[in-house]
């Protein structure tokens, strides 16, 4: 295999480094579409990386200084778009990778945004609401010059939610001296959020999984599903899939999961988790580890937790027919070939979980025109987008003889590169 002229480090990277893992796929797709080396150089690098230090008054009167990041990967197709996560292990490499993924994700579903991502190194589980609010507002204030409806539009991500978005919107609006609802998406409906946004990522996973089942003539009522994750993606996705007729046989959260080959009542299990903060002790299913959950025999596996869950160490033990990636980067580049050789059909993250950014786009549009759609309209538009995008990627895969992930990257890079050529290089 010949590498792209500029892919000098494509074949040697630490498997679990999210940026290098993403770039290895980018390099392969760039080579396959014969991407212009000059365009390659531009798309390989983020437009802007911002590091801020966030002094925050803690409840006990001391000041803690948190480190925050915002990486804006591309503005070629429109304003940058991407979530903000709060976690102790947030790193610039992770945020950089997620920003690039957002560029490709938006392009795959043909949404007119570029990619961005943000994060703060903190442990939100150990912080009060007041501490989180003060940290969020100072982070927003540090980034005022870089955010805005036409510049960069954040959204919720890991450990952030509607309330965090409301604080960001309010802080930005106070400095703008007027209310700017379109500066973030994923807001409460009462202050400019979109109906259907909270369920959008899980609903998008449902739509693309339905199409994959059609492709393989699988009866949904006999399709066994394993879901890793019980949050906005995994939990809601599992609820929607069960309502559609899928049999959910396992679901997990960070401390472990539950398994019942005869099926789990997802609503009941999630209520138990809400009350007990763990699945341990749930009497309707066996308690298992997340590692065991991933290796269960099933028809559809939905990793909807975090990065690097399926690696070269466990990929040969995965026993599903369809892998529908709810999380960003749950499968490493080194694991891709193993899964492909096993005949597992992977619906990649930049397609499978793009329902969230699609409805974020709808929210941005509604905010800008001041007119809001009914939930059934939002869901119908989302279905149209996800179904069309699934078959576009599938056709690309069949035409070029590649797996779905590389096909998604090829389609996305092709679209961004085409727009970049049309715009030209300002230098």
Image (cartoon, helix red, strand yellow):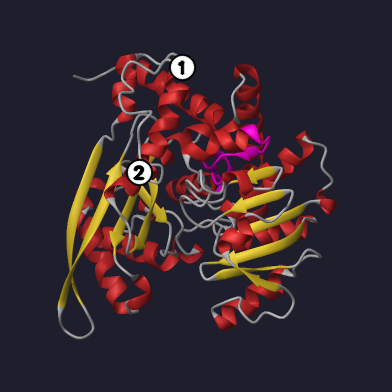
Q: Position of residue 117 (x, y in %)?
A: 35, 48
Write the residue at 45% across / 61% down.
187
Q: Position of residue 171 (x, y in %)?
A: 27, 63
In depth, the one of 330 and 55 nearer the eye is 330
Quadrant in the picture for residue 282: bottom right
Q: Is residue 351 magenta?
A: yes
Answer left or right for 99 relative to 197. Answer: left
Magenta stretch, residue numbers: 341-355
The answer for how far apart the CA atoms under marks 1 and 2 are is: 32 Å
Q: Earlier in the sequence, mark 1 or mark 2?
A: 1
Quadrant in the picture for residue 28: top left
Q: Position of residue 67 (x, y in %)?
A: 21, 60
Answer left or right for 36 relative to 67. Answer: right
Label 2 sits on residue: 116
Label 1 sits on residue: 1
Write the residue at 37% across / 58% down.
85
391 up-or-down from 125: above or below: above
Q: Disc 1 on helix, strand or loop?
A: loop
Q: Disc 2 on helix, strand or loop?
A: strand
In the picture, the disc for residue 266 is none
């Amino acid at each position: 295999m010949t590498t792209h002229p500029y892919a000098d480090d494509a074949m040697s990277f630490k498997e679990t480094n999210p940026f290098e893992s993403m770039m290895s796929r980018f390099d392969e797709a760039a080579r396959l579409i014969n991407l212009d080396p000059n365009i390659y150089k531009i798309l390989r690098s983020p437009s802007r990386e911002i590091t801020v230090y966030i002094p925050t008054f803690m409840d006990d009167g001391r000041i803690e200084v948190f480190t925050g990041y915002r990486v804006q990967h591309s503005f070629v197709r429109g304003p940058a778009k991407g979530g903000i996560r709060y976690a102790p292990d947030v790193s610039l490499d992770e945020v950089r990778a997620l920003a690039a993924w957002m560029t490709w994700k938006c392009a795959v579903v043909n949404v007119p945004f570029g990619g961005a991502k943000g994060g703060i190194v903190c442990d939100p589980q150990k912080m009060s609401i007041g501490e989180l609010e003060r940290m969020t507002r100072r982070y927003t204030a540090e980034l005022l010059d870089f955010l805005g409806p036409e510049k960069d539009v954040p959204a919720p991500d890991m450990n952030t939610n509607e309330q965090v978005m409301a604080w960001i919107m309010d802080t930005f609006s106070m400095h703008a001296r007027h209310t700017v609802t379109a500066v973030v998406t994923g807001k409460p409906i009462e202050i400019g959020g979109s109906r259907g946004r909270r369920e959008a990522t899980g609903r998008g996973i449902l739509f693309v999984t339905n199409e994959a089942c059609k492709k393989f003539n699988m009866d949904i009522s006999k399709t066994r599903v394993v879901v890793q994750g019980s949050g906005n993606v995994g939990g809601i996705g599992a609820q929607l899939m069960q309502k559609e007729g899928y049999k959910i046989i396992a679901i997990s959260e960070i401390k472990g999961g539950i398994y019942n080959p005869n099926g789990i009542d997802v609503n009941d299990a999630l209520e138990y988790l809400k009350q007990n903060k763990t699945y341990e002790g749930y009497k309707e299913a066996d308690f298992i580890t997340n590692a065991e959950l991933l290796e269960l025999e099933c028809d559809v596996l939905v990793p909807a937790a975090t990065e690097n869950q399926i690696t070269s160490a466990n990929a040969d033990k995965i026993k599903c027919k369809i892998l529908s990636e709810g999380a960003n980067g749950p499968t490493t580049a080194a694991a891709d070939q193993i899964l492909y050789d096993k005949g597992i059909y992977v619906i990649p993250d930049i397609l499978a979980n793009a329902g969230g950014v699609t409805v974020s786009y709808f929210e941005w549009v509604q905010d800008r025109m001041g007119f809001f759609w009914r939930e059934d309209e939002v869901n119908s538009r989302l279905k149209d987008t996800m179904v069309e995008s699934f078959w576009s990627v599938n056709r690309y895969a069949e035409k070029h003889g590649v797996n779905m992930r590389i096909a998604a990257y090829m389609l996305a890079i092709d679209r961004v590169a085409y727009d970049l050529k049309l715009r030209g290089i300002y230098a």
